């Protein structure tokens, strides 16, 4: 039984990670300030003897004796991270420093949830970990992108300077149950719009691409990375390389939900990446990991989840 701290544990990905690690009989502390997370996501864990829920903001120090820290706390959808950009960057920088301080003190292994956004609007396709990215440092996405880039720097410097045992994962677009209804990302927006027969809002002309990974696959990869025996620190891409345009994605959701929704077009947000697809060769080699859930299986589970929410 390991003592594990999960920051952002009441969020979308964090809640799935909490459930898996509790089921595997670990002693889990879920820490969250509930900015975008919700107690509903972890309701069935509350009261279990190996699960503890703590309301706390990681921009402030937190002390607990643990063996592993999964640092997931950070709003992830563009509308949420742009709502209070200064808070977003504080969460990535001060929050990661606080968690690295905790890892150093406890000699814990710390895993940082980084993101494909550190590649910005990529000029290399698909994106490999060796690519340094193309990020606007002063745009509306910068609070998130640059915050996450700086968090990677902090991870590497604590590793080199203080020997902290680190893992860095770069998560690509992930979807599944427990995404918030007001999340604002494309998967939840399109599914909710389709289920309510409302207009499907495509930003731009819909030719921009994304590659969507089902959350269970991602959680497998996260846990493999944390516990990999050769102590491979990354950074490593975790995502599903199956790439599609946003227009094709909208059509697929209309078809799967049997919706009468029409597609409408809205302005493309500033600095919206044109194409994104992970190269996961490194994850396959170092972790023996690749996603196994195809898009229709994953989407069906997600659609079924949102049906219970409207
Ligand atoms: P989410 O918004 O559902 O979850 C984030 C959680 O962090 C929420 O529960 C929120 O309340 C909590 N939080 C935010 N700021 C906090 C703070 N200062 N202190 C404590 N808790 C705080 O997002 P998610 O999709 O589950 O993303 C989880 C992590 O994975 C994030 O770090 C995100 O950047 C990263 N990520 C996610 C994706 C994706 O496609 N879902 C892609 C790339 C990276
Ligand atoms: N998008 C869209 N309609 C929506 C929400 C998002 O067309 O209602 C587009 C968005 O502009 C982007 C893509 O879908 O090109 C993925 O957006 P999301 O916010 O899910 O994540 P991102 O990958 O941009 O961080």
Image (cartoon, rainbow, N blue to C red):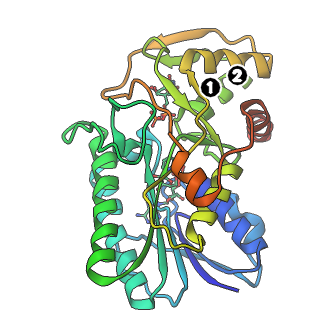
- Left or right, 309 with respect to 160, comes to right
Q: Nearer the viewer, residue 78 or 293?
A: 293
Q: Is mark 1 within 8 Å of ligand 2?
A: yes
Indicate whether 226 appears above or below 282. below
- Left or right, 19 with respect to 213, comes to right
Quarter in which the N terminus is drawn: bottom right
Rendered image quadrant of residue 248: top right
Of marks 1 and 2, which one's residue comes earlier in the chain? 1
Residue 228 numbered tag? none
Residue found 72% across the figure and 83% down from its top: 50
Q: Nearer the viewer, residue 309 or 24?
A: 24
Q: Nearer the viewer, residue 282 or 73?
A: 282
Residue found 44% across the figure and 61% down from its top: 234
Indicate whether 100 appears above or below 252. below
Q: Position of residue 184 (x, y in %)?
A: 52, 35
Q: Is residue 38 visible?
A: no
Q: Position of residue 44 (x, y in %)?
A: 78, 66
Residue found 56% across the figure and 53% down from its top: 283
**Residue bearing mark 1:** 190
**Residue bearing mark 2:** 253
SS class, disc 1:
helix
Answer few, some or many: residues within 10 Å of disc 1's Cα (few below 14, many 20 plus, some between 14 and 19).
Answer: many
Quarter in which the C terminus is drawn: top right
Rendered image quadrant of residue 302: top right
Kindly indicate whether the residue at mark 2 contacts the one at mark 1 (C-beta within 8 angstroms): yes
Q: Which residue is most to the left?
A: 138
Q: Which residue is most to the front?
A: 285
Q: Is residue 153 visible?
A: yes
């Amino acid at each position: 039984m390991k003592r594990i701290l999960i920051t952002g544990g009441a969020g979308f990905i964090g809640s799935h990670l909490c459930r898996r690690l509790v089921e595997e009989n670990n002693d889990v502390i879920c820490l969250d300030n509930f900015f975008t997370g919700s107690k509903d996501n972890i309701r069935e864990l509350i009261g279990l003897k190996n699960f503890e829920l703590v309301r706390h903001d990681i921009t402030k120090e937190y002390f607990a004796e643990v063996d592993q820290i999964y640092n997931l706390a950070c709003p992830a959808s563009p509308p949420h991270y742009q709502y209070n950009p200064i808070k977003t960057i504080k969460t990535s920088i001060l929050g990661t420093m606080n968690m690295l301080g905790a890892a150093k003190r406890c000699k814990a292994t710390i895993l940082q949830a980084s993101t494909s956004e550190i590649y910005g609007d990529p000029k290399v396709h698909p994106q490999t970990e060796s690519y340094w990215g193309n990020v606007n440092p002063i745009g509306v996405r910068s609070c998130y992108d640059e915050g996450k880039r700086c968090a990677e720097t902090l991870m590497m410097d604590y590793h080199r300077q203080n020997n902290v045992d680190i893992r860095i994962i770069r998560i690509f677009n992930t979807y599944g149950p427990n995404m918030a209804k007001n999340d604002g990302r494309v998967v939840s927006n399109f599914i909710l719009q389709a289920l309510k027969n409302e207009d499907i809002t495509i930003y731009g002309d819909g030719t921009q691409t994304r590659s969507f990974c089902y959350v269970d696959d991602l959680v497998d990869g996260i846990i493999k990375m944390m516990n990999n025996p050769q102590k491979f620190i990354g950074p490593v891409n975790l995502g599903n390389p199956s790439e599609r345009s946003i227009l094709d994605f909208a059509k697929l959701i209309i078809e799967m939900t049997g919706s009468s929704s029409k597609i409408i077009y809205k302005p493309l947000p500033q600095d919206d990446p044109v194409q994104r697809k992970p190269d996961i060769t490194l994850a396959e080699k170092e972790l023996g990991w690749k996603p196994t859930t195809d898009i229709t299986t994953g989407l069906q589970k997600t659609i079924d989840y949102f049906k219970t929410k409207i």
